[in-house]
Amino acid sequence: MNIAVLASGSGTNLQVLIEQLHEDKATDINISVVISDRKQAYALIRAKQAGIPTQIVSVKNYNNRIEFDAEIARHIECYSAELIVLAGFMKLFQPPFVRKYHNRIINIHPSLLPAFPGATAVADTLAKGVKVTGVTVHYVDEGVDTGPIIAQTSIPVYDTDDEESLHKRIQIEEHKLYPKVIKWYAQGKIKVEERKVITDSSETL
Ligand code: GAR
């Protein structure tokens, strides 16, 4: 199965997907393209080091977000990607793109959704003083981090945590969860019934 990975930043999740999926021939999962909206994203270097094609699609080069999305869709078709994997991709898609790829876009988010959606989840978590947070992998719908939840892992928030220490512990869990969920998807083990996602997997999280 070909997947497209979209990343805006450092790409530590991408790195794990390269090592545990793309380079493990037993998985039959191939990252056919890495797309970024930021030309300085370190994720692009990680992709190049692994010999994976890269594409940069910058918002500023398009008249509007529909055209931006359309260019991303063009690359997805060109590289025959069946699944779109958002790994720290910090742009929202417009409804036509989300409808075109219904239940074919997944995202990883650094909180237990529906708590703390948006771009500042870890800071918002600390500001609210919650004692448990975690990681969510979900389908992307037309809202901000509102799509059907596929899998979650929880972690404690410590009194001594700052944004950096908490995000670091969250990322350790992200790196375990994302490859597992993508493998389930490739094996046809994820079923969606309205908002409810059933993962037909004997593997525990
Ligand atoms: C990840 O922690 C991911 O959960 C977060 O961006 C980080 C990207 O890290 N995504 C969001 O906040 C989406 N709202 P990475 O570039 O090292 O994979």
Image (cartoon, rainbow, N blue to C red):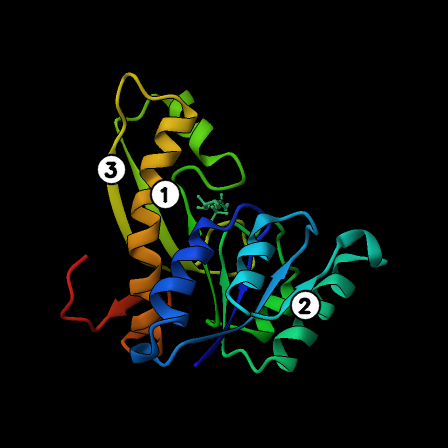
Q: Is the C-beta of the residue carrying label 1 under 8 Å from the nearest atom of ligand 1?
A: yes
Q: CA distance from mark 1 to mark 2?
A: 26 Å
Q: Nearer the viewer, mark 3 or mark 1?
A: 1
Q: Which comes before the other along the chain, label 1 or label 2?
A: 2
For label 2, the crowd category at 10 Å Cα-Cα, with few meaning under 14, some 14 to 19 and many 20 or more, is many
Q: Are marks 1 and 2 in contact (CB under 8 Å)?
A: no
Local secondary structure at mark 3: strand
* Residue for badge 2: 72
| Percent of width and height locating residue 30 | 45, 76
Q: CA distance from mark 2 to mark 3?
A: 34 Å
Q: Residue at x 27, y 27 (%)?
A: 157
**Quadrant where the N terminus is found in the figure:** bottom left
Quarter residue 95 falls in: bottom right
Quarter residue 94 falls in: bottom right
| Percent of width and height locating residue 133 | 30, 36
Local secondary structure at mark 2: helix
Q: Which comes before the other along the chain, label 2 or label 3?
A: 2
Q: Is residue 192 visible?
A: no
Q: Is residue 54 above or below residue 30?
A: above
* Residue for badge 1: 171
| Percent of width and height locating residue 28 | 36, 81
Q: Are marks 2 and 3 in contact (CB under 8 Å)?
A: no
Q: Is the C-beta of the residue carrying label 2 under 8 Å from the nearest atom of ligand 1?
A: no
* Residue for badge 3: 155
| Percent of width and height locating residue 201 | 19, 71
Which amino acid lies under the numbered mark 2 shown in the image of this protein? Ile
For label 3, the crowd category at 10 Å Cα-Cα, with few meaning under 14, some 14 to 19 and many 20 or more, is some
Residue nearer the viewer, 163 or 100: 163
Q: Is residue 11 left or right of residue 176?
A: right
